[in-house]
Image (cartoon, grey):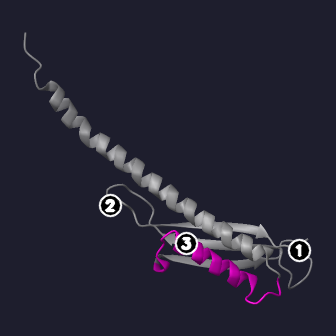
Amino acid sequence: MRTRRGASAVEFGLALPVLIYLALASVEYGWFLFVRTQAAHAAREGCRLGATAQMSAVPSPATLASTRTLAVLDEYGFTLGDLTVTTAYSDLTGDAAGTSDTLTVRVDVQYQPIAAGFVPTPAGMTVSLAMMVQGAT
């Protein structure tokens, strides 16, 4: 009867790369979702500020929304060269020209992976949030 000495070490050696890959993939995708959640929170903060501001405010509600979104992203440690914030108004009801019913804040982020090239991840992400403007009907 042959001994099986060393068989466990060989099996462990074969399974170890798969386990390392799964661990790195879990960390990478967890980080991706964390970054996306931070971008969504920043867009929500900016959109809420812009949607509740008076339309006649100076600076404009869209500028307030962009500024607040960028400030929250800066607090989270985002590099301003890696992201773009855009705001837009929409008249969904079509009731009158010049009225805005919703404010949309869009954040485009270039994703910086932890394990670059080891686990496939998207190069960027887009988060968009829309809120009804205060006083809109």
Q: What residue is shown with label 1?
A: 135
In the rendered image, which quarter contains the N terminus? top left
Alpha-carbon distance for marks 3 and 2?
Answer: 25 Å
- Could you tell me which secondary element the residue under label 3 belongs to? helix
- Magenta residues span 55-81
**Foreground tag (3 vs 2):** 3
Mark 3 or mark 1, earlier in chain: 3
Q: What residue is shown with label 3?
A: 73
Q: What residue is shown with label 2?
A: 117
Name the outermost residue toward the front: 75
Residue 58 colored in magenta in the image: yes
- Left or right: 120 in relation to 97: left
21 or 45, which lies in front?
A: 45
Give the x, y percent position of residue 129.
68, 67
Name the outermost residue toward the bottom: 58
- Left or right: 122 in relation to 15: right
Residue 63 colored in magenta in the image: yes
Report crowding for label 3: few under 14, some 14 to 19, many 20 or more residues within 10 A (C-alpha). many
Report crowding for label 2: few under 14, some 14 to 19, many 20 or more residues within 10 A (C-alpha). few
User: What's under tag 1, amino acid-wise?
Assistant: Gly
4 or 55, which lies in front?
A: 55
Give the x, y percent position of residue 17.
25, 43
- Left or right: 115 in relation to 76: left
Tell me if residue 50 comes above or below residue 58 in the rendering. Answer: above
Q: Quadrant of residue 64?
A: bottom right
